[in-house]
Amino acid sequence: MTILLTGGAGYIGTHTCVALLELGYDIIVADNYINSTPLAIDRVKEITGKNFKSYDVDVCDIPGMERVFEENKIDAVIHFAGLKAVGESCAIPLRYYRNNLDSTLTLLECMQKYGVRNFVFSSSATVYGTSQNMPLDEKEPTGCTNPYGWTKYMIEQILRDTAAADPEFSAVLLRYFNPIGAHESGLIGEDPNGIPNNLMPRILNTAAGKMKALTVFGNDYPTPDGTGVRDYIHVCDLAEGHAAAIKYAVEHKGAEAINLGTGNGYSVFEMIHTFEEVNHTPVPYTLEPRRPGDIATCYASPEKAEKCLGWKAKRGLAEMCRDAWNWQQKNPNGYKA
């Protein structure tokens, strides 16, 4: 079985490549490397000892993507490709709508033309908006607070409509929570462009001395220690969830939204202290007021994933912190030499 991964050279994409190859799947990667590098593909081959095709192509490019489908017998698609920075999406929303929607429409049209009907989509917990009901399950009302989230929301609807129109089409909409960590080899990991916004990359930069101190936004939330609580999931667990979703897509028809999270909420202070304890490395921090729009607590109900996919997260916070620091130490500048 051959699986096309769009955006397969990215953070979650590379870890999913490894998971699929280790399960015996054949893969093809399509990526324009706007947020990634071909070196990440070489690292996947090094980890697995397996070779595979990769195309330097923009998924919005219809002739380029038709070439990928024409040259290969593809059985399923995992769609990671897309712009993904929440803050940037608010500054340049039209670029996000154009890129993320166009890439999906191009991909679906190619799949339709070449008779490929199994689709796994990289969605996001951002589609739940600012819901206060925890844990979040898939029946929770959806709605978004930024253009990035709305692109995920709109693509989910496009996939539902496609499945409704074609009884042979299958789409699994994977709503991620907060992926962190790295492959235990330290060969692949998260390499954000510019100044990172997410907590773990900022912890890594602080621990590595690239930042003087981590800024903690708010210590007066109604949580056990006053800091915000989120559902962090090891990227390798997330990757294994995609492999399980491919199997589900092949065996079921229609569109199904499924959370990928641990079901546990970890606070900012808990993250800092666990990182320090596991890695014997201090993470100095300063306190600032809450950021507008941040909610106190957000974590998943993972029950549907276990029921439908036979999947649940296996790695704990200590492993997430250990593997993230291992990646940072072996790649102090990410994939850059």
Image: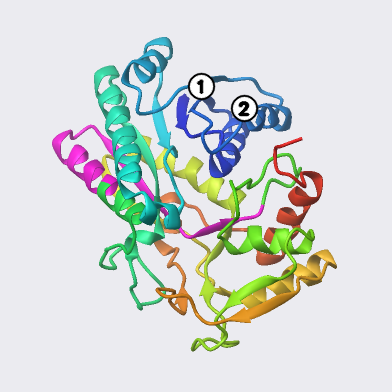
- Measured as percent of width and height from the top left, residue 311 is found at 50, 53
Considering depth in this image, is 98 or 17 the residue closer to the camera? 98
Q: Indicate the quadrant where residue 25 lies.
A: top right
Q: Is residue 6 above or below residue 248?
A: above
Q: Is residue 73 above or below residue 10?
A: above
Considering depth in this image, is 238 or 244 the residue closer to the camera? 238
Asked if marks 2 and 1 touch (Cβ < 8 Å), the reply is yes
Residues in magenta, as a range: 155-181
Q: Is residue 130 left or right of residue 298?
A: left
Quick check: is 15 in the magenta stretch?
no
Count residues near mark 1 (Cα–Cα under 10 Å), then give few for <14, some for 14-19, many for 20+.
Answer: few
Mark 2 or mark 1: name the one nearer the start of the chain. 2
- At numbered mark 1, what does the secondary structure look like: helix, strand or loop? strand
- Measured as percent of width and height from the top left, residue 292 is found at 42, 75
Count residues near mark 2 (Cα–Cα under 10 Å), then give few for <14, some for 14-19, many for 20+.
Answer: some
The residue wearing badge 1 is 56
Please give the name of the residue rendered at 53% of the width and 82% of the height, measured from the top-left corner.
Answer: 289
